[in-house]
């Protein structure tokens, strides 16, 4: 378990989940590297194993920030063009339920995260216990072509949602994703059928990708002093 030194309860829980999931990574694997503060713990540990124990892996990053972190940690990188099928992808989530459905995109990286997760033989989510919920009810991040924002807003309203263009801090205007698009955070209240809502969102022209993920094989839920592993039945 993570040392509690200098870690808040939530950070320790994140670290516990993220480091435990690294045990799934073995020599020769191509590993999808997610984005965010939880999976950053996995990336740091894998980097240590590469440097200190000669672990032989290559990573595929899901964002420029993860690419920079992986390089700093000494993980060799490849691309989906060179390595289209990954052995495993590890990533965080903003909310997850007992059926392993998740909402992602709090870091605006969900489009590349979904491409990487869908390219992997096994997609594993790492999250602290506060992310676990009996039902998904957080806003769903959607990546949207700036040209299509008004159309997407109207279509989200028709689906019973409300949406807000995500802005940075201060007066910087809309945040821009690694793909050059905007993020619309779409609130639907309780999401009883995540896969169905995801399908409907996918049909909106100009909506590049939504943050509902229904393909995790496992979720590692971290607590301050233990990790629970949920597996798809
Ligand atoms: C980025 C994501 C992140 O994985 C998600 O926001 C969780 O982040 P954190 O681990 O920092 O709580 O989906 O787009």
Image (cartoon, helix red, strand yellow):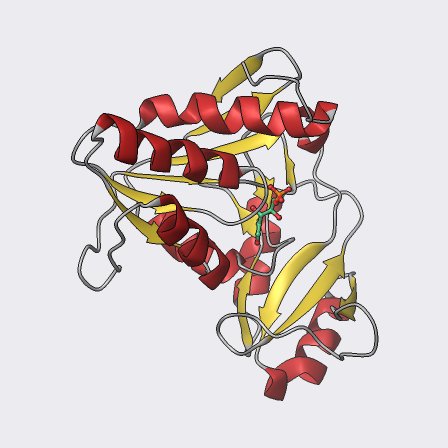
- Pinpoint residue 141: horizontal percent, then vertical percent: 65, 59
What residue is at 74 percent from the left and 77 percent from the top?
154
Closest to the observer: 128 or 165?
128
- Pinpoint residue 118: horizontal percent, then vertical percent: 36, 49
Question: Does 89 sit left or right of 207 as displayed?
Answer: left
Closest to the observer: 5 or 159?
5
- Pinpoint residue 53: horizontal percent, then vertical percent: 24, 26
Is 42 above or below relative to 77? above
Is 135 above or below relative to 203? above
What residue is at 33 percent from the left and 35 percent from the top?
122
- Pinpoint residue 125: horizontal percent, then vertical percent: 49, 34
Question: Does 153 sit left or right of 51 as displayed?
Answer: right
Q: The C terminus is located in which quarter? A: top left
Q: How many marks?
A: 0
Confirm whether residue 220 shows in the render. Answer: no
What residue is at 66 percent from the left and 30 percent from the top?
11
Is 42 above or below relative to 83? above
Confirm whether residue 228 shows in the render. Answer: yes
Question: Does 106 sit left or right of 68 as displayed?
Answer: right
Question: Does 57 sit left or right of 139 as displayed?
Answer: left
Is 58 above or below relative to 226? below
What residue is at 83 percent from the left and 72 percent from the top?
170
């Amino acid at each position: 378990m993570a040392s509690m030194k200098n870690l808040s309860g939530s950070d320790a829980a994140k670290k516990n989940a993220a480091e435990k999931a690294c045990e799934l990574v073995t020599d020769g694997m191509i590993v999808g590297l997610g984005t965010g503060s939880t999976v950053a713990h996995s990336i740091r540990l894998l980097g240590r194993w590469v440097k200190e124990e000669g672990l032989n892996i290559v990573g595929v990053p899901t964002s420029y920030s993860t690419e920079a972190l992986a390089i700093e940690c000494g993980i060799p990188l490849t691309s989906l063009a060179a390595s289209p099928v990954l052995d495993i992808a590890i990533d965080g989530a903003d909310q997850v339920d007992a059926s392993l459905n998740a909402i992602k995109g709090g870091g605006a990286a969900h489009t590349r995260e979904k491409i990487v997760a869908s390219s992997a033989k096994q997609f594993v989510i790492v999250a602290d216990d506060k992310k676990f919920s009996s039902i998904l009810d957080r806003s769903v991040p959607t990546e949207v072509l700036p040209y299509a924002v008004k159309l997407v807003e109207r279509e989200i309203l028709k689906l019973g949602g409300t949406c807000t263009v995500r802005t940075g801090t201060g007066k910087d205007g809309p945040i821009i994703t690694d793909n050059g698009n905007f993020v619309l955070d779409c609130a639907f209240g309780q999401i009883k059928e995540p896969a169905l809502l995801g399908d409907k969102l996918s049909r909106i022209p100009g909506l590049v990708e939504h943050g509902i993920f229904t393909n995790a094989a496992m979720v590692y839920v971290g607590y301050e002093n233990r990790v629970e592993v949920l597996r798809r039945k």
